Amino acid sequence: MLALTAAAEPPHVALTEVPDPAPLPSEALVTVSAFSLNRGESKRLATMEPGAVTGWDVAGVVEQPAGDGSGPPAGTRVVGLVNPGAWAQRAAVPTDALAPLPDAVSFAQAATLPVAGLTALLALQIGGLPLGRRVLVTGANGGVGRFAVQLAALSQAHVTALVRDPGQAPALHALGADAVVTELAGEYDLVVEGVGGATLASAIRHVAPVGTIVSFASTTTQETSFPTRELFGRAPGATLRGLLVFPELRREAGSGTANLARLARLVADGKLDCSVQREASWREAGEHVQALLHRTVAGKIVLHVD
């Protein structure tokens, strides 16, 4: 089959022939129709073994159901999470991270949900019921950030979006943000933090007592430094919690399937915008990986396996 694999030369990705995946009994073989690009997998391309397949987000059709009888039957439109193997014509997807798609949800929309959508949803779950609480989303114009803004707003939180570019304010207000800021003031009960460095340090200075900061990514190599009393003295009981989607889903069996189904239903009902900013053929992957890494595209990039 064809797959996008790591390559030694920039843009460090190439379409090549690779062996078909061999699914485990608990995995379904999915014919991939679309996948979205994430910064984590894209940044790793330059250091991966040439010829290796990466990719996490899968949207497609079940070609062969799981041998153990779990998961959806052949012919079902699905969305799933795999680590790794999504950037290929076929992917072996664990059925505990695979959910059927409503007819109203396109493959392009579905492809944005596994990493970005699940990370946003899990971060809000970790922070507790957002109803009536003050939620801050840093890096709010990214894939996870846009989902977090919407999900927090749907939960009737007061949502503040932190961005570098104030020109993004109209789009984020449309997604449900109550305030869009470039600098922090006040206190927040929950911080969904995906920037790191000085931004994480600022979030620590603005978390409320007994509040929660969920750190899920770092887009900077800058270290985080803050006066320790700003946490234990100013905000006693506050928690700084790390979130990585793959091990988080393993904490609770079936949570991947259930949460993907929840997100897909919200999309089908018109309550969740997947923020697909660019769609293209996977044959043009190199330029779109670079666009993501250089932050020239807000929201999500989806590639179609044509």
Image: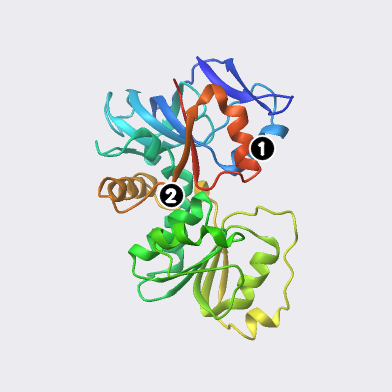
Say how the picture is coloured: rainbow
Q: Position of residue 188 (x, y in %)?
A: 51, 76
Q: Compared with residue 224, is residue 11 higher up or lower down, i.e. above or below?
A: above
Among numbered discs 1 and 2, the one appearing first in the sequence: 1
For numbered disc 2, what is the local secondary structure?
helix
Q: Callout 2, which amino acid?
A: Gly
Compute the Cα span from label 1 to label 2. Answer: 21 Å
- Residue 109 visible in image: yes
The image quadrant of residue 61 is: top left
Number of marks present in the image shown: 2
Residue drawn at x 65%, y 52% as measured from the top left: 219
Q: Compared with residue 239, is residue 148 higher up or lower down, i.e. above or below?
A: above
Q: Which residue is mark 1?
A: 44
Q: Callout 1, which amino acid?
A: Arg
Residue drawn at x 51%, y 46% as measured from the top left: 246
What mark, if any, has residue 141 been given in the picture? none
Q: Position of residue 116 (x, y in %)?
A: 48, 48
The image quadrant of residue 306 is: top left
Q: Position of residue 41 (x, y in %)?
A: 60, 38
What mark, if any, has residue 117 been given in the picture? 2
Tell me: 142 left or right of 61: right
Residue drawn at x 25%, y 39% as measured from the top left: 104
- Residue 26 visible in image: no
